[in-house]
Image: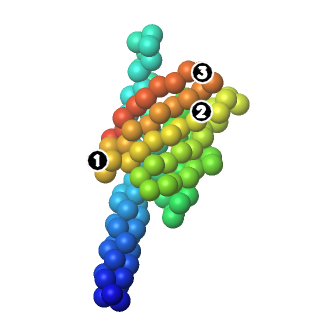
Amino acid sequence: MKTRKLIFTALLMCCFFTGFATIEGMNGKWTGILKTDQGDEYPLLYNFKIDGDKLTGTAKTPKGDMPIDDGQVTGKDFSFVVVVNKMEIEHKGRFYGDSVGVDLSLGDAKSHVTLLKEK
């Protein structure tokens, strides 16, 4: 019985550390193109820094690099806010290893973008 508990605990720990190591792969620069319903395209560049369950870094905007605020990581999911011209743009996303899917919200306006790691 103790052997089963020991094996089960070891498997849980492996899953935990594997998930933690996976999200660490999100560190670095990620780029994508935000396409609006009107046909406009905006290049996006994020520089993510993961430290445990905290997400920090910057987002490149027409006003320059803006800090990522309130960044949190839960498993492969994350969220943060970028403030541009006193407007809070909420970001919620998921890390897939080779890409990042992000939903952006500004009031009622919502968009989705896929980011790829810059090489």
Crowd class of label 1 (few under 14; some 14 to 19; many from 20; radius 10 Å): few
- Secondary element under disc 2, as helix, strand or loop, is strand
Query: Considering only vertical position in the picture, is 50 above or below 36?
Result: below
Q: Quadrant of residue 3?
A: bottom left
Task: Please give the name of the residue rendered at 60% of the width and 40% of the height, measured from the top-left corner.
Answer: 81
Contact (Cβ within 8 Å) of mark 1 with mark 2: no
**Residue type highlighted by circle 1:** Asp
Gap in Å between the C-alphas at discs 1 and 3? 29 Å
Task: Please give the name of the residue rendered at 51% of the width and 31% of the height, measured from the top-left corner.
Answer: 104
Q: In the drawing, what numbered circle is on residue 90?
A: none
Query: Considering only vertical position in the picture, is 63 above or below 96?
Result: above
**Residue type highlighted by circle 3:** Asp
Task: Please give the name of the residue rendered at 48% of the width and 58% of the height, measured from the top-left corner.
Answer: 50
- Tally of marks: 3
In this image, 4 relative to 51: left or right?
Answer: left
Crowd class of label 2 (few under 14; some 14 to 19; many from 20; radius 10 Å): some
Q: In the drawing, what numbered circle is on residue 108?
A: 3
In this image, 79 relative to 96: left or right?
Answer: right
| Nearer the observer, 13 or 67 | 13
- Secondary element under disc 1, as helix, strand or loop, is loop
**Residue type highlighted by circle 2:** Ile
Find disc 1 in the rendering and name its residue.
98
Q: Nearer the viewer, mark 3 or mark 2?
A: 3
Find disc 2 in the rendering and name its residue.
89
Residue 29 percent across, percent down from the top left: 41, 47
Residue 88 percent across, percent down from the top left: 65, 33
Q: Is residue 119 visible?
A: no
